[in-house]
Image (cartoon, coloured by chain):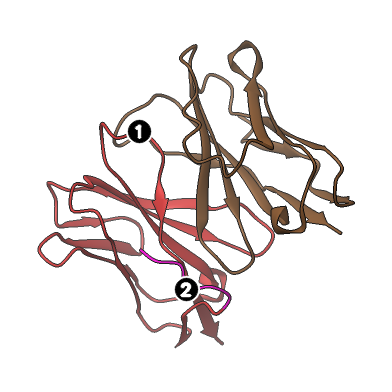
Chain colours: A red, B brown
Amino acid sequence: GESVGLHLPTLSVQEGDNSIINCAYSNSASDYFIWYKQESGKGPQFIIDIRSNMDKRQGQRVTVLLNKTVKHLSLQIAATQPGDSAVYFCAEREEGAGNMLTFGGGTRLMVKP
Amino acid sequence: GAGVSQSPSNKVTEKGKDVELRCDPISGHTALYWYRQSLGQGLEFLIYFQGNSAPDKSGLPSDRFSAERTGGSVSTLTIQRTQQEDSAVYLCASSLIRGAGDTQYFGPGTRLTVL
């Protein structure tokens, strides 16, 4: 993904609604993807990951969907809570090309009570 | 057990001074990574250590940046002759082993401000 500079895309949702955060990745050879949540003043926190041989993976209140055809990743959060307010980053990794993660620019999720 | 810790949490320095940032990875994690996060942006990879292998320095932005990892554990990122554009949050992460599917756990970061 590309950095969006100082102005992060922002998604504003009502508490209790479902949230969908999208990410377009750039490397068709990437075979592993991760979503991180970053709260203000903290480091990124792992949420959920998915390998490229899968198209869906579910966790607790979160689901990640992978569409390799269009190189698109999404994070769905069910019954969004105020504690979900944070910046969400997707990251991709290509096995065999180093172990570093390539991060997208992030999306700010704001949950209205 | 304890997570990744970093120190200091905040560092303010004057342009031209050298700074050292410290990272204590999770005990037993063999891989250690440094990233930089500028205001409102995603994370930029800097350097990666795996066991006793030579580090992957491909992300270091200039020769003013260097990092060491002593005894396969603690790492220090050094920035010499700091510039204002070095101002950012420097994040360290560690993982148990190298390879796809290996989760990186991040520390809280060090916020560096160069005046």
Above or below: residue B82 compared with residue B7: below
**Residue holding disc 1:** A98
Q: Position of residue B60 (x, y in %)?
A: 56, 40
Marks 1 and 2, the one that precedes in the sequence: 2
- In this rendered view, identify the residue nearer to me: A35 or A95: A95
Numbered tag placed on residue A4 in the rendering? 2
Does B40 appear in magenta?
no
Q: Position of residue B108 (x, y in %)?
A: 66, 48
Q: Within 10 angstroms of label 1, few (less than 14), some, or many (20 or more) residues? A: some
Above or below: residue A28 compared with residue A83: above
Q: Amino acid at mark 1?
A: Gly
Please give the name of the residue rendered at 76% of the width and 52% of the height, measured from the top-left corner.
B83
Q: Is B23 positioned to the left or the right of B102 in the image?
A: right
Please tell me whether mark 1 sits on a helix, a strand or a loop. Answer: loop
Q: Within 10 angstroms of label 2, few (less than 14), some, or many (20 or more) residues? A: some
Please give the name of the residue rendered at 53% of the width and 19% of the height, measured from the top-left corner.
B28
Q: Is A19 positioned to the left or the right of B59 in the image?
A: left
